[in-house]
Amino acid sequence: MKNPFRSLRKLLLILFGIVGFGVLGFVIIEDYTFRDALYMTIQIVSTVGFNEVQQFQSWGQEFTSVLIVMSFGTFAFAVSQLSQIITSGNLNGYLKFKNVQKKMDRMDEHVIICGYGRNGKQAAQTLTAYNQPFVVIETKAEGIKEIKADGSIHYIEGDATDDDVLKRAGIDRAKALISSLHNDADNIFVVISARQLNPNLQITSRANEENTGKKLLAAGANATVMPNKVGGGHMAHMIMKPSVVDFLDHLSVGGLSATNIEEIKVDQLPDSFDAKTIEDLQIRKMTGCTVVGLKSPTTDTIINPPVDAKLTKDSVVFVLGNSQQIEKLKQLFSVTAE
């Protein structure tokens, strides 16, 4: 946003320059004291007329004429510019912009959402449910209008393909980025820029065409999602297995449902659990949650793993439970939502 004070700052510099010139002139030419010289100069510059503090003895009249010409209209124009800034609303908008920017400058380990269309909005709702800080980058007027109407979303009005905009969003401090722009080429460009600016960033991007997914992964995305494909598959499943889909719709990966799925990284557990089995964790007994999956670096995800399955370094245990049980699980094992 353009700084409304920038033009006024130039005028003030000119004004102070004229005042300084006038004071110096009266002190040197008419031997005025600093106080009298300042008083004379302000009378002239403000165009309200003046009375001589003392009768001119030297070149005072000539110098005064020069000063009048120099200051003609400058003071009045500066005052009018200040009045315009205050009454136009630009000042209020700029101050809000600076306040939001300061908050974003303090953000750390946040998520950046590029694009506030249907997918971007859903991502924002899910991150809100996780209590995950995020900032939205949006350039379309309708998207900005929706964000402003919400009132709780940190946003930047700008083009996500611009590196400077990504830097303003704190990409160097962010933990992840979601690119949900409508144009595949723009998503690829965002992914390339984001990966260069933050090599450790977790990047997920929308892909509208099937062949775009591979390009996004090659560009640096960690994962891609095709909304049209996911939506079509979901509708087909609703026809073929409606009860199963209804059951799955009651599950959530965090915050949006009464029944949630949570993950426990073995590396987060105390050393005493090293090389122990799922049964040794006693998750069901202590929290009420049920272990539904296990994934290790050397094997694919095991659904409904046996209780004697051993926990290895870098493996992940997936559990199912209601919100109270999940909360108890987090407290017991110091689990943090990813």
Image (tube, rainbow, N blue to C red):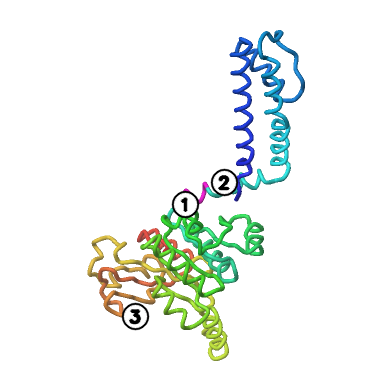
Q: Quadrant of residue 261?
A: bottom left
Residue 301 lies, in percent from the top left, at: 34, 79
Magenta part of the chain? 102-106
The quarter of the image holding the C terminus is bottom left
Left or right: where 329 falls relative to 129: left
Q: Quadrant of residue 124?
A: bottom right
Q: Is residue 5 above or below residue 326?
A: above
Badge number at residue 302: 3
Residue position for label 2: 98
Residue position for label 1: 107
Residue 305 lies, in percent from the top left, at: 33, 79
Residue 226 lies, in percent from the top left, at: 50, 79
User: N-terminal of the two: label 3 or label 1?
Assistant: 1
Q: Residue at x 27, y 71 (%)?
A: 311
Disc 2 to disc 1: CB gap under 8 Å: no
Of circles 3 and 1, which is in front? 1
Q: Residue at x 61, y 48 (%)?
A: 2
User: N-terminal of the two: label 2 or label 3?
Assistant: 2
Q: What distance separates the C-alpha of mark 3 from that of mark 1?
A: 37 Å
Q: Is residue 147 above or below residue 236?
A: above
Left or right: where 16 falls relative to 209: right
Left or right: where 229 falls relative to 280: right
Residue 292 or 63: which is nearer the viewer? 63
Disc 3 to disc 1: CB gap under 8 Å: no
Which amino acid, mark 2? Lys
Residue 290 lies, in percent from the top left, at: 40, 73
Badge number at residue 149: none
Disc 2 to disc 3: CB gap under 8 Å: no
Please say whether residue 49 is one of the residues in the magenta stretch. no
Label 3 sits on a secondary structure element that is strand
